[in-house]
Image (spheres, helix red, strand yellow):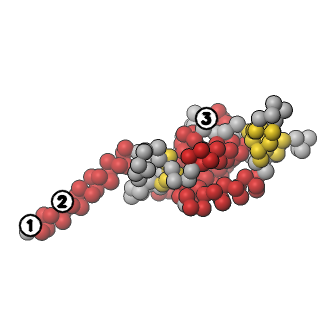
C-alpha cells in the first residue's frame, strides 16, 4: 500500500553536515577530490541509502547552506515536492511523515534541517570562505563570526593572509 505515510525521524544536523561535505559534487570538486573514493558514513539512515541517493541528497542540501536568504523558500519547496508533512500522531504529538515511496534519506535530512532552522534561524548556516573549499558548517558561535568549516581551513587562511601582509611590507621597505 503506497498510500500509507511513514514516520520520519530527523537526521541530526551534525550528520547532515558530514553528508553534504563528503558527498556533494560541489564540495568534492572544490577540494580536488572528485575522483576520490566516497568515505563510509557512520549514519544509520545512510546505511540503507544507495550511493546515488546519498549524492543527490547532499547536492540538494548544499544550496540551503550557500544561499541562506533563500533557504526557507527552498526548504518549503523541497518538502512539498517530496511529500514531507507534519501530522498529528495517535498520541496527539506532531511528527514528520512521508509517503511510503519517498526517499527516506532525503526526508530524514529535510526534516532534520527544517527543525534545526525553525529553532535557530538561517543565519547559522554557512559555507567555508577558504580557497579550494566550499564545505558547509553550522555557526554556533555567540557573535555569528564563523567563516571557515574547520580549524584546518582557518589556519590555512590565516597563513595566507600573513604571507600577503609580509610580502606587502617587504616590498614597501625595499
Ligand atoms: Zn573549509
Residue 62: image x %, image y %?
57, 54
Q: Which mark is residue 166?
A: 2
- Residue at x 84% of width, y 32% of height: 90
Which quadrant would the C terminus be assigned to in this image? bottom left
Using the rendered image of the protein, determine whether residue 109 is visible from the camera's viewpoint. Answer: no
Labels 3 and 1: the sequence-earlier one: 3
The secondary structure type at the circle numbered 2 is: helix
Residue 129: image x %, image y %?
41, 57
User: What residue is shown with label 3?
Assistant: 43
Question: Alpha-carbon distance for marks 3 and 1?
Answer: 55 Å
Q: Quadrant of residue 116?
A: top right
**Numbered disc total:** 3
Of the pair 157 and 29, the residue shown nearer to us = 157
In the image, residue 7 sits, relative to residue 57, either above or below, namely above
Callout 1: 10 Å neighbours few (<14), some, many (20+)? few
Question: Alpha-carbon distance for marks 1 and 2?
Answer: 11 Å
Callout 2: 10 Å neighbours few (<14), some, many (20+)? few
The secondary structure type at the circle numbered 3 is: loop
- Residue at x 12% of width, y 69% of height: 172
Of the pair 169 and 35, the residue shown nearer to us = 169
Labels 1 and 2: the sequence-earlier one: 2
User: What residue is shown with label 1?
Assistant: 173
Residue 50: image x %, image y %?
68, 43
Amino acid at each position: 500500500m503506497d498510500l500509507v505515510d511513514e514516520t520520519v525521524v530527523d537526521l541530526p544536523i551534525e550528520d547532515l553536515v558530514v553528508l553534504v561535505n563528503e558527498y556533494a559534487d560541489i564540495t568534492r570538486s572544490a577540494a580536488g577530490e572528485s575522483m576520490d573514493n566516497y568515505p563510509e558514513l557512520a549514519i544509520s539512515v545512510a546505511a540503507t541509502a544507495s550511493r546515488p541517493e546519498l549524492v543527490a541528497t547532499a547536492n540538494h542540501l548544499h544550496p540551503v547552506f550557500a544561499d541562506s536568504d533563500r533557504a526557507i523558500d527552498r526548504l518549503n519547496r523541497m518538502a512539498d515536492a517530496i511529500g514531507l508533512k507534519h501530522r498529528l500522531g495517535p498520541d496527539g504529538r506532531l511528527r514528520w511523515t512521508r509517503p511510503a515511496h519517498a526517499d527516506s534519506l532525503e526526508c530524514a535530512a529535510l526534516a532534520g534541517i527544517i527543525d534545526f532552522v525553525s529553532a535557530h534561524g538561517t543565519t547559522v548556516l554557512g559555507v567555508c570562505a577558504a580557497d579550494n573549499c566550499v564545505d558547509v558548517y553550522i555557526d554556533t558561535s555567540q557573535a555569528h563570526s564563523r567563516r571557515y568549516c574547520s580549524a584546518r581551513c582557518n589556519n590555512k587562511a590565516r597563513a595566507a593572509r600573513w604571507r600577503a601582509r609580509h610580502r606587502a611590507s617587504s616590498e614597501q621597505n625595499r
